[in-house]
Image (cartoon, helix red, strand yellow):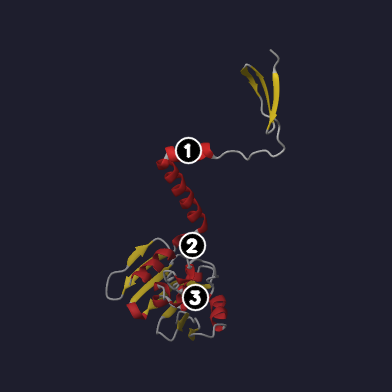
Amino acid sequence: MKAKKLIKNGLVLFISGTILITGCASNNNSNPPSTEETSTEDEKNPKEKNEKDTQKADTESGSQTTPEPTDNSKTDSPETPEPIDDSKTDSPEELQISGLFKEVYLPYATREKPFMFEAVKTFVQNLNSYTVEITEPTQEDMGSIKLTDENEDYVYFAFSPTDSGIEMIISLSYCQAATNSEVSLNNFSSDCSPEYDVFNTHIIGETELQVSNPDEQKAFLLQK
């Protein structure tokens, strides 16, 4: 039996009693991909689809939201305390110890200046801040020098001749009127050697106390 060849609507059919081959002729117009499978999966899992849609919406919403900037200029900053001006604070030394102690008594008590009468007289005559009284030494009288300031504080020098006949300091004292206190240096040796210097502190009306050096005398004056 001969096979019959039929062409119908672009299909080639070979029929030999029974359909042996069914072929599909090529067609220039290609069909678009089917979306039936994707739609079917979404229909099968509606819960997952909703969750994905929600996450996508949240992501898009978050990316579009920008927090408002903080205006730091409106934040109240703590007030900074004003610095203390130390120059306006009176120290005990400025209140109690006059320039007379520091300028006259102390340089002699520490032996920075010479002890001879003429040298002391020359020094005090060049000071303009104090009232100066000078008594020249004679055979009858000891030499002395007294300086007084406006607060009635004073320094007093007493002189006596040494074995060599030179008038030297034998007693030096500073009196602080505000506290009724006195400090002194005494040296009654024949040659006025420094190793014989004696330092005392004294509250007027009480017993004198011996100390070791001018620094202790200064501390005594600051305590009053």
* Image position, residue 121 (x, y; %): 54, 80
Left or right: 16 in relation to 200:
right
Tag 2: residue type? Pro
Tag 1: residue type? Thr
Q: Is mark 3 in CB contact (under 8 Å) with mark 1?
A: no
* Cα distance in 3D space between marks 3 and 2: 18 Å
Query: Circle 2 sits on which residue?
Result: 194
Left or right: 146 in relation to 178:
right
Please state, as top left, top right, bottom left or bottom right, where the N terminus lies in the image.
top right
Q: Earlier in the sequence, mark 3 or mark 2?
A: 3
* Cα distance in 3D space between marks 3 and 1: 115 Å
Instruction: Kindly state the secondary structure of the residue where label 3 is placed.
Output: helix
Among the 4 quarters of the image, the one containing residue 125? bottom right
Query: Circle 1 sits on which residue?
Result: 40
Among the 4 quarters of the image, the one containing residue 13? top right
Q: Earlier in the sequence, mark 2 or mark 1?
A: 1
Please give the label number shown on residue 109.
none
Q: Residue at x 44, y 84 (%)?
A: 149
Query: Circle 3 sits on which residue?
Result: 104
Q: Residue at x 52, y 38 (%)?
A: 36
Q: Residues within 10 Å of mark 2 (few under 14, many from 20)?
A: few
